[in-house]
């Protein structure tokens, strides 16, 4: 059996990007209403990979996640991110909201204001 050795990423010419991991933030995102359906109580933290240094099969950092219902999250995966977000204002708009939500993480009142502004923009 061949064992792969761990790569010392500090030796790379271009340093590997560190992705933010924050379970408390993901749980908080999941507590918010779905961006698309506005339904409360069944959201998941949906990561936005497109344009966020994440390839196929790789999640972006937790600073790039938004609340989607289980059904909308499945649709995001099934249709593909570019197509899914094109129906909802584009990947850039969703990514900006994700970053804004991360900046106010834990402040539900402020998050609801951001989500409502995102819906009407």
Image (tube, grey):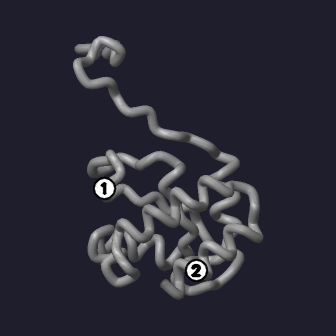
Nearer to the camera, 80 or 97:
97
Q: Please tell me whether mark 1 or mark 2 is closer to you in this view.
A: 2
Q: Residues within 10 Å of mark 2 (few under 14, many from 20)?
A: few
Nearer to the camera, 114 or 20:
114
Residue denoted by label 1? 51
Residue depicted at 47% across the width and 71% down the height? 73
The x, y position of residue 6, in whole percent, is: 34, 15
Whether residue 6 is visible, yes or no, is no
Asked whether, in this view, residue 20 is left or right of residue 88, the answer is right
Residue denoted by label 2? 117
Q: Secondary structure at mark 1?
A: loop
Q: Secondary structure at mark 2?
A: helix
Asked whether, in this view, residue 91 is left or right of residue 114, the answer is left
The x, y position of residue 114, in whole percent, is: 62, 72
The x, y position of residue 82, in whole percent, is: 28, 70
Whether residue 103 is visible, yes or no, is yes
Residue depicted at 60% across the width and 76% down the height? 115
Residue depicted at 32% across the width and 68% down the height? 81
């Amino acid at each position: 059996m061949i064992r792969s050795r761990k790569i010392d990423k500090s030796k790379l010419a271009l340093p590997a990007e560190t992705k933010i991991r924050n379970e408390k933030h993901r749980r908080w995102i999941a507590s918010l209403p779905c961006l698309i359906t506005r339904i409360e109580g069944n959201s998941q933290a949906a990561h936005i990979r497109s344009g966020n240094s994440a390839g196929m099969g790789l999640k972006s950092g937790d600073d790039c996640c938004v609340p989607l219902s289980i059904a909308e999250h499945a649709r995001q995966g099934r249709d593909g991110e570019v197509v899914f977000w094109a129906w909802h204002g584009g990947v850039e708009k969703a990514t900006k909201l994700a970053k804004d939500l991360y900046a106010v993480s834990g402040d539900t009142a402020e998050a609801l204001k951001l989500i409502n502004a995102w819906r009407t923009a």
